Amino acid sequence: MTVVFLDFFIIIYFIGGTVQIAAAVFSVGALDIALANLFASCGVRDISFGALAATMLRFLTFWMPIVAGYLAVQAIGARRLLNPNGKANATVEPKMG
């Protein structure tokens, strides 16, 4: 069994971001293939684990913020976010007397 340390994943994260920027002009699968091969070349024995790690990395960096943003808009409400004269912008005046 191969032990992989945290610094390995940090380095792969930054390399993956660089590859993502470079592969932005290609199809969506180019980054996943490149990351899976990068994991395999860095010592991950089975290519399926490298592909799984690449897929999880893509999920966490791309899809998770989209899903979290969607859920936040649903929880707060789109009308409340887009209404500039709503209760969120109302000021409270102190009572005199």
Image: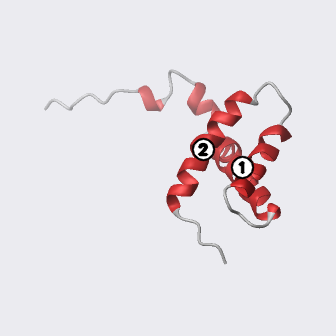
Q: Nearer the viewer, mark 2 or mark 1?
A: 1
Q: Secondary structure at mark 2?
A: helix
Q: Secondary structure at mark 1?
A: helix
Task: Give the residue displayed 69% in from the left and 35% down from the top.
Answer: 19
Colouring used for the render: secondary structure
Rendering coords of residue 85 (x, y %): 50, 21
Q: Residue 38, labelled with which disc?
A: 1
Furthest toward the bottom, the residue is: 1
Label 1 crowding class (10 Å Cα cut-off): few <14, some 14-19, many 20+? some
Foreground residue among 67 and 20? 20
Q: Residue 12, labelled with which disc?
A: none
Label 2 crowding class (10 Å Cα cut-off): few <14, some 14-19, many 20+? few
Instruction: Give the position of the C terminus as an image quadrant.
Output: top left
Q: Is residue 76 left or right of residue 25?
A: left
**Res. 3 in view:** yes
> Residue flagged by tag 2: what amino acid is it?
Ala
Residue 8 to residue 74: above or below: below
Q: Residue 72, labelled with which disc?
A: 2
> Residue flagged by tag 1: what amino acid is it?
Leu
Task: Give the residue displayed 68% in from the left and 62% down from the top.
Answer: 43
Task: Give the residue displayed 77% in from the left and 50% down from the top.
Answer: 37
Q: Is residue 85 left or right of residue 23?
A: left
